[in-house]
Image (cartoon, helix red, strand yellow):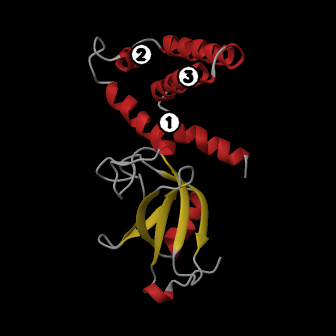
């Protein structure tokens, strides 16, 4: 890939897109060093125009962007980067820097993950999620097992509607389990993407 950094005085715009939902997450700028670091580490790294320095997205917040693919445009002066976000991308705490309050059905799991995360500090008597997150890990693991069995049984003995309901219960409890272990859905999606390159 040959990038024309000279055209933009050493910088090129980098459009960051969610690799699973195709949602545009943010726009940043890269110089040649930032692009090299991104390729080497697998974490999206930019050049900050306001601070005049290299920075890796998530270095202070922990909300990293894991590199999936990079392509350049027809003029070789703009990058389209597909990435898997770990947590909110925008500094305002939203999934995207563009109209962050709106999300498609395919990105709802990311939104649900944020809701689950926020429930940890809620009153356990008012929030089932808080009760699970603050209880023993084995209870959440047991619920994932139960919901997995119920989903499998529904697939062969119940209606499609019942299977969808059981699948939703399974996904919810799996997200809670990942959160309890300090992991995120993006970690699982990243592992799947590595297996299917």
- In the picture provided, is 61 more to the left or to the right than 20? left
- The image shows residue 75 at horizontal and vertical percentages of 57, 84
Q: Position of residue 152 (x, y in %)?
A: 68, 18
* Position of 72 relative to 24 (above/below): below
- Of the residues under marks 1 and 3, which one precedes in the sequence? 3
Q: Residue at x 41, y 52 (%)?
A: 58
**Cα distance between the residues tagged 3 and 2:** 14 Å
* Residue at figure coordinates x 69%, y 13% from the top left: 157
Contact between labelled residues 2 and 3, with CB atoms less than 8 Å apart: no
> Residue 180 at x, y = what percent?
46, 24
Disc 2: which residue:
132
In terms of sequence position, does the residue under pointer 2 or pointer 1 come before the other? Answer: 2
Which residue in the protein does label 1 denote? Answer: 184
Q: Pick whichever, 83 or 109, lies toward us.
A: 109
Q: Secondary structure at mark 1?
A: loop
From the image, which quarter does the N terminus lie in? bottom right
Q: Tell me the SS state at disc 2.
A: helix
Q: Nearer the viewer, residue 120 or 110?
A: 110
User: Residue at label 3?
Assistant: 170
Q: Earlier in the sequence, mark 3 or mark 2?
A: 2
């Amino acid at each position: 890939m040959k990038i024309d950094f000279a055209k933009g005085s050493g910088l090129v715009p980098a459009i960051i897109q969610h690799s699973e939902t195709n949602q545009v997450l943010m726009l940043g700028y890269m110089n040649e060093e930032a692009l090299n670091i991104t390729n080497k580490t697998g974490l999206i790294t930019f050049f900050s125009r306001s601070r005049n320095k290299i920075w890796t997205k998530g270095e202070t917040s922990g909300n990293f962007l894991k590199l999936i693919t990079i392509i350049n445009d027809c003029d070789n002066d703009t990058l389209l980067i597909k990435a898997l976000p770990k947590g909110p991308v925008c500094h305002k705490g939203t999934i995207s820097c563009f109209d962050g309050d709106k999300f498609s059905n395919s990105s709802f799991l990311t939104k649900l993950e944020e809701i689950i995360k926020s429930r940890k500090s809620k009153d356990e008597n008012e929030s089932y999620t808080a009760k699970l997150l603050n209880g023993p890990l084995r209870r959440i693991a047991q619920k994932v097992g139960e919901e997995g069995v119920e989903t499998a049984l529904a697939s062969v003995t119940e209606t499609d509607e019942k299977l969808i309901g059981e699948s939703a219960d399974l996904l919810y409890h799996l997200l809670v389990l990942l959160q309890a272990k300090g992991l995120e859905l993006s970690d699982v999606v990243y592992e799947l993407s590595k297996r299917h390159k």
